[in-house]
Image (cartoon, rainbow, N blue to C red):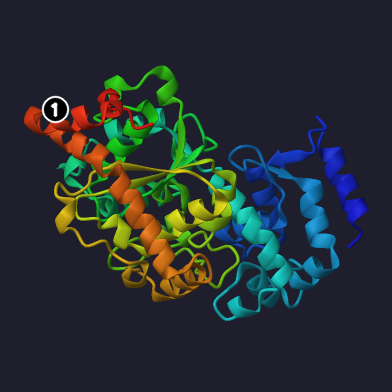
Amino acid sequence: MDSEAVKEVFTKADTVGKGTFGYAVVEAVLMRIDPELEGSEIRSLLLASGSLRGSQGEFVDYCALIDFFASPPASSWYQPGSKQASEQKALVIGKAEAGKCVPQSLADASATDVAHNLYKRGFSVRQLMDFVKKYHTHSRIRISDRTTADVVRDIIIPETRQKRCAMAELFEGGLKEPVCLVSHCWGQNFMLLVEAIMAHASGQVLANAEMCTEDDLEKTYWLCIFGVNQHVSICGTESYPCDCRAEKWLNDHPLCEMNKFGLMMKHISEHVLVMDNNLVSLSRIWVLKELHTALSLGISTELCGDVPGDMSVIHMPSVRDALATREEDKRFILADVEYSPGVEAFDAMVSNRVWAEHKKFDLIDAVAKRDTKRAKPLLAADPTLCNVQLR
Ligand SMILES: [Zn+2]
């Protein structure tokens, strides 16, 4: 195709000369060219082309998009309306039958794009507070009685069903570029996660919304439950029912959003790990992968949340025994850890970190239980704890 001629047509239509058109306009044009295209397919094409602009990818750089279609590899992968259109479309969007032969250059380019798009789906503490307030009681169940997995199943998936988007994309005030990534376990109580984020933002051990200053409320975070589009990832199963029937992008697909956290964390400067009484979060492979990535990238990890009262009876889990929802995830993560720094060394680093934080958590627990008898000697032994600041 003569891309310069096509660009000329677009440039004429772009009367204000911004170089972009709105996402919906481009989507409508592509649907006219190929009526078989679905919304999620167009989104994957635009992502792969690297033409999305704006904080929410709400604009499309038409020159970048035309170049994508016109470049030799792209034109052989996808030519709307051509005889082989459905086959070529399958190559680009990774339909199941063609998913394993996605060209490597597309895989590399779009992995970076997907990671960057994921990164951009952060939120502020204020938006998190709004979420908690809005769904405080939903379907007659209080949010404090829900695990994080419950919140994903009963709130996030149904609420994002119509637009088949990530929850963060629906937050009032738009997407925020996150400073801090939060690692947590979906089996934990959801409010433990919320309180850990507030504690990290405010630097207070027992934080609540009132203790957050205006600056604290503007701090930005990234959470998989809000940042990942659940409709191209996990929905439509018994655990996470949904009738959207969106195509799923799994690990072997370049647009998969569930295996890009390592790439995405290159944009992140802080990391929080939400601990719990039974150290369940330390037994989950993805939590350990994020901790491993933070260590490799030199990002400091703050431990927040809760720890067992008596650490002496606790057996620290090993990454070798970590649990994964998908076995293939565990295989590649364990291989990464084995390569560097090695399983034993990694386990020792995690264990040392938890023990070092133990005194702080002990004090948090004593203060939470108003146990002054326990809190006083802890403070006497380590006066630096008296500020009960997390950082
Ligand atoms: Zn769905």
Give percent across and percent down for residue 243. 37, 62
**Which is nearer the eye, 274 or 319?**
319
Can residue 208 be seen by looking at this rendering?
no
Position of 252 with respect to 322 (left or right) is: right
Give percent across and percent down for residue 249. 51, 66
Which type of secondary structure does the marked residue at label 1 adopt? helix
**Which quadrant of the frame does ligand 1 lie within?**
bottom left
Q: Amino acid at mark 1?
A: Lys
Query: With respect to residue 113, does 173 lie above or below?
Result: above
**Residue at numbered disc 1:** 376
Q: On the rendered image, what quadrant is the N terminus found in? A: bottom right
Give me the residue at 72% from left, 56% from top.
Answer: 49
Q: Quadrant of residue 381?
A: top left
Give me the residue at 7% from left, 30% from top.
Answer: 373
Give me the residue at 59% from left, 61% from top.
Answer: 41
Give percent across and percent down for residue 196. 31, 38
